[in-house]
Image: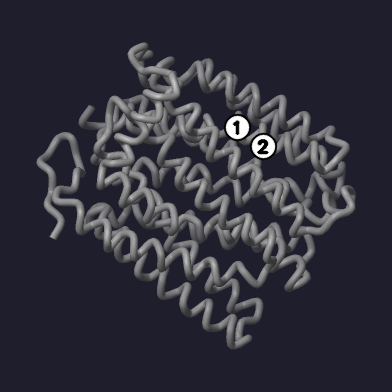
Amino acid sequence: MAHLHRQSIWIIVLLGALCVVTPFAVDMYLPAFAAIAHEYRTTTPAISLTLSTYFVGFSLGQMIYGPLLDRFGRKRPLYVGLAVYILSSIGCATAHSLKMFVALRFLEALGGCVAQVGAIAMVRDFFPVKESAKIFSLLFLMIGVSPLLAPTIGSLLLAGMGWRWIFVLLAAIAFAILTVTFLLLPEGHQPDHSVSLRPGPMISSFWNILKQPQFLTYTLAGAFSFAGLFAYVAGSPIIFMDGFHLGTKAFGIVFAVLVMGFIGGNQLNVVLLRKFTSQQIFFIALILQVAIGAIFFAGMLGHMLGLKATLVLFFAFLSCIGLTYPNSAALALAPFSSHAGRASALLGCLQTGTGALISMGIGMLGASSVVSLLSSTALVALVVLLVGRMGIRELIVSEESDAVVIH
């Protein structure tokens, strides 16, 4: 379809609702890190590893759901995955040991990841390639509800009812999204029974997608850029609550304000796309991200960063990621139509897997690693882009127009 039809706004809202499943699962329990650590008799950095466990499950699960979304259509895998997520969330609310809690967080991620990978694939189903970056930016406006509301809601539940009720609410939210999806979301892709679920053909199909130069370049460059957001999410409780001694309510406010930089970057992207191409925006934003990361790192080495400076630099850094992520996703997925589910899954797996490794490093190394990881991942992203672009002779930007040569 060349233009957005009447249902497009409702479809964007429904896809946005699916996209908030994982952000809520990540953001809502962040203020409870200290309380969970106290109950399980461990440390706050150790609890941050439960976040890494979620990211690992989220990354691996997408590789499972990608072929399922192509073979069975988009909605049936969504039903199964969200059901697993709901049951696992209830399990987290009743877990009596840290090992059980970690295992259930992994299962929660395996189930919940279908919501985001399905939503991203359906952007390719319902909208033309040329509109993808704009649609992704609008979806991130919906995702912006999570960091604005989730930590605050988590703080209120923590103060009034205890941290376990956070996971009860996560299950209830997912049940509501599942119900709305069942009743209102159209099927974006008819089942394709030619898609094999055998390991050999599945691996072969993923390998063929990975060999596409445009996909590989923008997926990896976007993954390392986006890893900065994972570093912020995993490291923020350590930096602001342990380092700057902010309370849970103050942390919730700071977390929400800073992530507004990411959301603001996404919405600025919609405006910039009227005059510039996705590849131009991605390149310039990545250069700015590297520069800000370098300033951040130098300030940390020189012990010159107080709370205000840290807030400003985090805000600027996250704003750059808000520009890079939707454009890298749109450019990576542009070459695919019939394989959109698998391409979306591989995109999500590589990006989330990279973020999971970064957050694990923070969990093991502590606050000192956060800023160094921010700056180094941005630099790696820029190098990947510069090297990868030399191997792309033609950039696919729209199935309705000729490919545009990159100079």
Question: At x 52% / y 44%, what residue is drawn?
Answer: 143
Name the spot of residue 335 as percent of width and height, x first.
24, 37
Q: Are marks 2 and 1 in contact (CB under 8 Å)?
A: yes
In this view of the protein, can residue 152 be seen by the observer?
A: no
**Which residue is drawn at the image coordinates 58% and 60% (left, top)?**
231
Specify whether 2 is left or right of 265: left
Residue tagged 2? 106
Residue 391 drawn at (x, y percent): 20, 54
Q: Amino acid at mark 1?
A: Leu
Q: Quadrant of the N terminus?
A: top left
Disc marking residue 273: none
Which quarter of the rendering shows the C terminus?
bottom left
- In this view, the residue in front, 231 or 271, is 231
Q: Is residue 246 visible?
A: yes
Tell me if residue 357 comes above or below residue 347 in the rendering: below
Residue at mark 1: 110
Query: The disc labelled 2 sits on which kind of residue?
Result: Phe
Q: Is residue 369 above or below residue 104?
A: below
Picture residue at 25% right of the left edge, 60% below the top: 280
Mark 1 nearby-residue class (10 Å; few <14, some 14–19, many ≥20):
many
Q: How many marks?
A: 2
Q: Between marks 2 and 1, how big is the CA–CA gap?
A: 6 Å
Which type of secondary structure does the marked residue at label 2 adopt?
Answer: helix
Percent position of residue 178, x then y? 59, 22
When asked about the image quadrant of residue 312, the answer is bottom right
